[in-house]
Amino acid sequence: MKKPIIAIAGLTACSGCQLTLLNCEEELPEIAQRFIIDYFPLGLTERLITGPIDVAIVEGAVSTPSDLEILMKLRNSCRCLVALGTCALWGGIAAMKNQESRKDLAGTVYGSAADELKTFNPQPLHRFVKIDFAITGCPPEKGELLATLAALLRGTFPVFPRYPVCSECRSRENLCLLIERNEMCLGPLIQAGCNARCPAVGIRCEGCRGPVTEANVAAEMELFLKKGFPRDEIVSRMQRFYPEWNYEQRS
Amino acid sequence: MNSVLEISPLTRVEGHGCINVLFAGTKVEKVSLSLYESPRFFEALLKGKSYSEVPEIICRICSLCSTVHRICSLLAIEKALDLRVSEQARLYRELILYGGHIQSHALHLFCLVLPDCFDVAGLSGLADKAPQELKRWLQIKAAGNLIQETVGGRTIHPVTLIPGGMGKPVNREGLLKLKESLQRVLPETRQAYELFRSFLPNGDKLATPRYVSVRPEGAAPFLGDSLTMGNGETIPVDSYKNLLREQMAGTGNAKTILVKDEPATVGALARLNLGMPLTPMAATAFEESRMLLTNADIRANNLAQAVELILAVERSLEIVDILLKADFTREEPAGIVPKKSRGSAAVEAPRGVLIHSYSFDGRGICRGADIVTPTVINQAAMERDLLALATHMEGADDEELTDALERLVRAYDPCISCAVHVLRI
């Protein structure tokens, strides 16, 4: 079989999604041999995107003209585009204050030098190009990334769970942090696939995988309010990885 | 006639950067290093957030160093709020810190630098040319990640580390698994050190760096409350701004820092030169390479990182043994009463001195944050050395020069994601 040609690029992000790939220590040598890696600045001395590429895997949100340029180049030279991680799919951590003025945020960090920065609100990839597949998570789960690569070798994409973190958490029989400990756990609203990592070690779900389809956001909001959390604190927590929740949504 | 050699993007480094070499005829006139990672404004993101959210947000600054950012953040918060954590939490934090160093150094040495040693473009080339070595050394990286996964609950952006304490401790089975994996890779770290010792660069010596590090206290080599420059001069972390002077760089989105008007160098080489406490096998390795490492220029940094790999694995084993013997049970984190306060902490990140500094209002809401990262501290020295090297190499063709300059940048092991988030002056 012909080896698939892949490109891996990072836009506005922490490199954690690309690191997830490099953290597959066991599988990495085989991946390097079963794919042709055409463009991967983090791991390869190749500066040009020449194409044609079978699959481009892109980490990060789009927040600068140069991000957009790389994204367009990749989209124009690849057959399939995979959004890797929460920033690429939902906007992610850097987008949490997208409602505030970008100029003011820049000013807080860079003072008067901020005027020279060429940057706009971090946006997910689908605002600019068509994406063919997505792997969520901050960081993504190694298993989901490997399942995707394995499926690509067979010319397809895998199917990931479409239920909330709560389902996985219950089946692990963890103590419910929301009901029994009154913590602001986002498990009911968030896409599963992490096997409820955080609640399993006693830490509330921070929502790093983004909304599950048909999340009952309004009911969770009511529950939090009833438990006495102030609305602004709830909103601040929920927006950490995704700034565009519809708080009225009832699945 | 003027011409420019543009190396963009820099490859096999974390983040986005580029080098421009400006020639007047054949003479090198200027070398600029731009770190143009998209700014994410982390300090602005933290403003208005509760102290309990701060570590969870700030660790996203960078994946390679997420653990150390999280720990530095906890230490600064706990200093501000006068919290003391238990012996158990302290030991687990130290252990995961080594996990982070092992993963980061191993990633840099075996995935980003090793292709240079074997003269290949990247991992695929390594997998063809040195498949056995690559497999063995990736096991070292895996051992670091196993620590992060087991102790932190997740390999990147660990979740169990919280202000005042920690989530669930690791059970006996988990600790024994860690011990086994660390024992297995310890001899490999020695082999890797020998390999990097054989790849030391020749050529003209670059400037002797002005090393800066956290002054270690006790047996933990990466933790302390003051910064040192080696000549007996130390300065408490709280006054870091008196030592590290920030200025916005001419190009790119990061700021540069000078120490006493001079570029400073932080990282593994600086730590070894400033007398970090070593474990037995690491001490032997350092002793053998003393001539190569003492007052050496930055090109010896990769060898220094290899020495630290030995150190981090040995010291992790010591801590795992202490934890096994102590047989701790789960504790509740310390109770926290927010108050108007301010706190700064420093930790040695894999790439060098990392400082977090926060101020909180009476409700524990973050009102100001300052993050100083090692790559920002190193940037001025990086530019100085790039200029010196390019000048030495006048007349070389573009490919040769590109290759040499990129290798020099890799010796510094920059982490550009972190670098662009520095604070208001």
Image: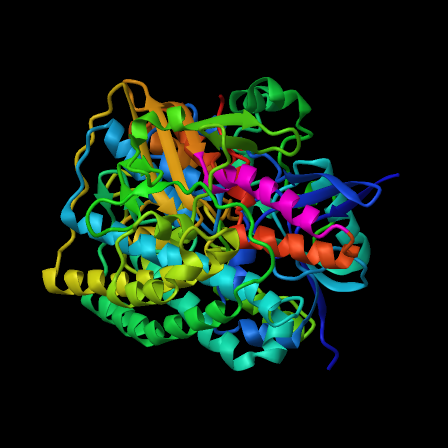
Where does residue B385 sit, x and y in percent of width and height?
59, 45
Query: What percent of the width, then of the height, locates residue B401?
Result: 72, 54
Instruction: Tell me if residue B386 is in the magenta stretch.
Output: yes
Q: How is the image coloured?
A: rainbow
Total labels: the figure holds 0
Q: Residue furthest right?
A: B1
Q: Is residue A100 visible?
A: no
Foreground of the two, B304 or B207: B207
Residue B407 falls left or right of residue B140 = right
Question: In which quarter of the view is residue B320 placed?
Answer: bottom left
Residue drawn at the location 60% of the way across and 29% of the way down: B249
For the record, the magenta segment spans: B372-394
- Residue B349 visible to an observer of this rendering: yes
At a point 69% along the width and 29% down the height, the residue shown is: A118
Could you tell me residue B394's position as x and y percent? 75, 50
**For residue B366, above or below residue B346:** above
Q: A102 or A176, which is in the foreground? A: A102
- Secondary structure that dominates the magenta span: helix
